[in-house]
Image (tube, rainbow, N blue to C red):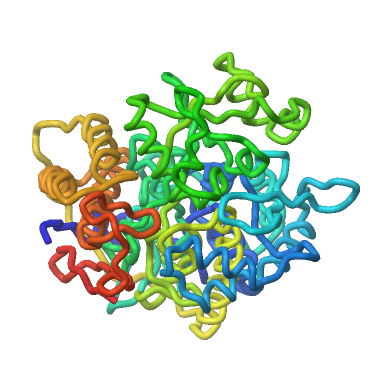
Amino acid sequence: MALQAPRYLAPFHPKHIPHFFTDVLIIGGGLAGLRAANAVDSKLSVLVVTKDELKQSNSNYAQGGIAGVLAPDDRFEDHIADTMTAGGELCDSEVVEMVVREAPDHIKELIRWGTEFDRESGQLTLGREGGHGHNRIVHALGDATGKEVMRAVIEWTRRLRNVEILERTFTLDLLTHEGICRGALVADASGAKTLVWAKQTILCTGGIGQVYRESTNPPVATGDGHAIAFRAGAELRDMEFVQFHPTVLYIAGSSRSLITEAIRGEGGRLIDRQGHRFMLDYDERAELAPRDIVSQAIASQMEKTRHPNVYLDLSHLDPEFVLKRFPGIAAACGKFGIDITRDPIPVRPGAHYMIGGLTVDQNGATTLPGLWAAGEVTSSGLHGANRLASNSLLEGLVYGEHAGRAASAAASLIEDDFRAIPLQNEAVILPNEPLDLDDIRNSLKSLMWRAAGVQRCREELVAAADTIDNWCRYVLARQFNDADGWELQNMLTLARIMVSAALSREESRGVHLRTDFPETDDAQWHRRIAFRRDGNGALISVGS
């Protein structure tokens, strides 16, 4: 395929820049990364690198909560069945069972670490979200679970003497030698580079939402981990599956704030511009249908009514309860004169969660020796073709622990004979004319929203692939000196893989809706699609 990605983004020479040595390098400071750090043997040194502050991660912005079987009338088998059903029959059943059965212990661990989940009369308050058959979602601060969980986990992790944390440090590329991951090339806020050599590396870089014009993700979610792993030779899988959250606040001039699914779990109704409650026209579960169904129904209803959004209506609920349960959303909407207890909230879908990522086993091992991964950057098999609500923080916890323990065990087997490997990347001659990076980035985000958003078709995907190829030809060949350029190169690389995957899957399944192939085709497509980089930097499909 046309994508030709250079092996390394920036020039470096081992004699010209500093070196840092650690037993385990963790790239990404969200929940998966910090849980991995806590799982590493305290006798080993750990370096956590994150490109912004620790609190700037998708984990921190998670509103809904963490799913787990905690109620007396709930069963593991029910949570497993709900996850499998939502996943469009592509979930790995062994992975689902492992994660679901470990969930209660991880929730209890977070409580021991200081997380204050919401309670009533001393008992954990369990909410319900789309696709769940029972109340099993623990939440905190009403609608700011991620913020509270990350507060507690950050405080706990900072106490570990063997863990060093580098914030505002960009990871440009993984370092590989003789087919093994040896660490990473990083740069601080000034652009000064360092070669970090590690016995084992764990990738926990999160999502890709910034590839799209409409997204719930923070600015850091530019898919860097997916792209650096691809350049290093790791396999990426399920890259056509992007989950769009059905309800994102849609007000001109505002950020695209997430409106948690818990609102619908508590009885919120979706209505169109005429006040019609339309979800019952699409699914008998109405607002509690899985996210893929609700997002696609909203997109269809917007087309029918020729309106840029639909509305969430909470006016039939008790106002006191609404304000207590959703204080953050009430405040966000209040800035625009919307009283959520009586006014409809304008919403539309937005890119929310990347289901695809690095192929990993149950220990988080990738296809590249020396490299492990956990969280949203992976394709673990837990989510299949559509993630069940509130299973994402759970996955980060479970796989963060597994990857941390496995990488720790592997690093313990390697002697302390730290040395730098003579890797280098030559500088290239830069073209004289500057590039308007913001213009290319905005154009890419709009293109991906149109061609590879909630609805896809071959004609638009082919046109998008051609356009991205043209951008790649003159953007990927350059060597930039700051994060703006590196992020754009990563986003282009990632977008091209995503478009290729969406073109390949000629059916509709889960979050992947092909209007030209509207039916699910188990005979041809009950399988995974994977990609990797060949020796010349080209994108090749490896299938599975």
The residue closer to the viewer here, 284 or 182, is: 284
Q: Quadrant of residue 286?
A: top right
Residue at image coords 60%, 40%? 264
The furthest residue to the top: 337
Where is residue 331 shown, x and y percent of the image?
A: 64, 24
228 with respect to 137 (left or right) = left
42 with respect to 539 (left or right) = right
59 with respect to 229 (left or right) = right
Residue 474 in view of the camera? no
Where is residue 485 shown, x and y percent of the image?
A: 27, 41
The residue closer to the viewer here, 191 or 233, is: 233
Residue at image coords 32%, 71%? 522
Residue at image coords 21%, 67%? 533
The residue closer to the viewer here, 327 or 485, is: 327
Q: Quadrant of residue 133?
A: bottom right
Where is residue 79 shown, x and y percent of the image?
A: 62, 66
Residue 443 in view of the camera? yes
Residue at image coords 29%, 67%? 521
| Above-or-below relation of 44 to 221 | below
414 with respect to 160 (left or right) = left
The residue closer to the viewer here, 423 or 366, is: 366
The quadrant the N terminus occupies is: bottom left
| Above-or-below relation of 187 to 24 | above
Where is residue 436 shown, x and y percent of the image?
A: 20, 30
| Above-or-below relation of 7 to 453 | below
